[in-house]
Amino acid sequence: MAKYKALSEAFIPELPNYYQGKVRENYDLADDRRIIIATDRISAFDRILASIPLKGRVLTQTARYQFEKTADICPNHVLEYPDPNVLVCRKLEILPVEIVVRGYLAGTTSTSVLTQYKAGKRQMYGFTLPDGMQDNEKLPRAIITPTSKAFDGAHDEPLTADDILRQGLLTPQQWEMVSDYALRLFERGQAIAAERGLILADTKYEFGTDKDGQVVLADEIHTPDSSRYWFADSYRAGQRPVSFDKDFVRNWVVERCDPYKDDVPEIPEDVIDATTKVYVQAYETITGNSFDAGDASVDPLERIRGNLRSYF
C-alpha cells in the first residue's frame, strides 16, 4: 500500500462554530446542519493514542454503508457526504446516555462486563449473570449496558435503567424507544456480520433529538471503532478470538503501561502501518466492497477544504 498522510486535525477557519471532539472536528452551520470531519486520531482509555492514516475515511465509509442498511429501523442524522471523511448531518441534541449493546462476555475497559465479571461482580447494569462463565462466552441474550456520556475528560460510568429514569437522563418514552432501536439495530448488525463471516460481539450507539423532539440515531454505527468484531471461524469461548477492532492498538498499549495512570509510549511506525491495514481490511470485510483509498499524493486536509468550499 502507498504511504498516506494521516489527517491528525481538520481545522478549517472559513467554517463556523468549530468544536474539536476526541477524533472528529465539528462545525455547526446556521441552518441546523452540522459538518463532521473524521480525522485519523485513535482514541482509547479517554485519551488520544496516535493518528492512523485512512482511519477516518474507513470509519466514515463503513458507517455510511451501515446507516444505509439500517435506515428502515430508525431515523438517522445523515444528510450527505461531500468528501470520504466528511458527513453533513442534522444537528441534534445528543442524549446524555451512551447505549452499549453486548452479546458476549467481553471487553477490556473498566465498564466492560468481562472486566467487572472477573472482578467478582455478577450483578451489573440491572442484569444478573451466572457463575462459571468463560471469557468471551456468548451471553444468554443481548443486553443493554448503558453508561453516562462523559464530557471534558470525565470517565463514563455504568448506569441501570432505574438510574437513567431516576436521574431524569431520559424520559420513560425515550428510554423505551432507544432500547428498542438499539436491540433491533444490533440484531441487524449481527445478521450483516454473519453474512461476512464475522461476529458482532458488542457495539455502542448514540442517539439525539432533533428540533421536533424525534429520537434520531447519531454518531457512527457498526464500525470497527464503535464495535467489537471477531472472525467467526476463530471463535471459541474461553479464548481470545481474532479481531480487527481497536484492541489491536489497545493491547499493545496495555502490555507496556497502565493507560489510565501512566504516560503512553509513542506507538511505533510498524504498529501504525499494520493498524491502517487492519482498518482497510475491516471495511472490506464488513461491507464486502473494495476500499477506495484515494490518491496518496493529495494532502487530505486540502482535499477536504476543496470539497467543502461551497459551505464557506
Image (cartoon, rainbow, N blue to C red):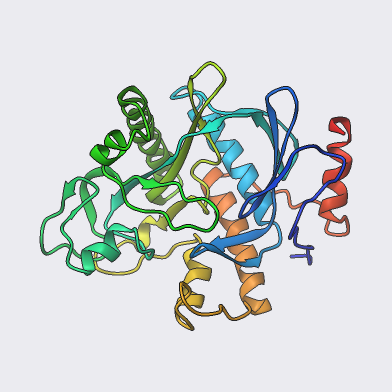
Q: Nearer the viewer, residue 253 or 278?
A: 253
What residue is drawn where x is 25% and y is 65%?
Answer: 135
In the rendered image, which quarter is residue 173 located in?
Answer: top left
**Residue 122 image point, x, y percent:** 15, 58
In the current view of this chain or complex, which residue is farthest to the bottom? 256
In the current view of this chain or complex, which residue is farthest to the left? 131
Whether residue 117 sits left or right of residue 155 in the image: it is: left
Residue 270 lies, with reference to residue 123, above or below; the image says: below
Whether residue 278 sits left or right of residue 302 in the image: it is: left
Query: Which quarter of the rendered picture does the C terminus lie within?
Result: top right
For the image, the number of numbered tags is 0
Query: Which quarter of the rendered picture does the N terminus lie within?
Result: bottom right
**Residue 215 image point, x, y percent:** 46, 24
Does residue 276 appear in the picture of this structure? yes
What residue is drawn where x is 57% and y is 41%?
Answer: 63
**Residue 67 image point, x, y percent:** 54, 33
Whether residue 36 sits left or right of residue 106 in the image: it is: right
What residue is drawn where x is 64% and y is 63%?
Answer: 276
What residue is drawn where x is 27% and y is 35%?
Answer: 166
Does residue 289 appear in the picture of this structure? no
In the rendered image, which quarter is residue 13 located in?
Answer: top right
**Residue 55 image point, x, y percent:** 65, 56
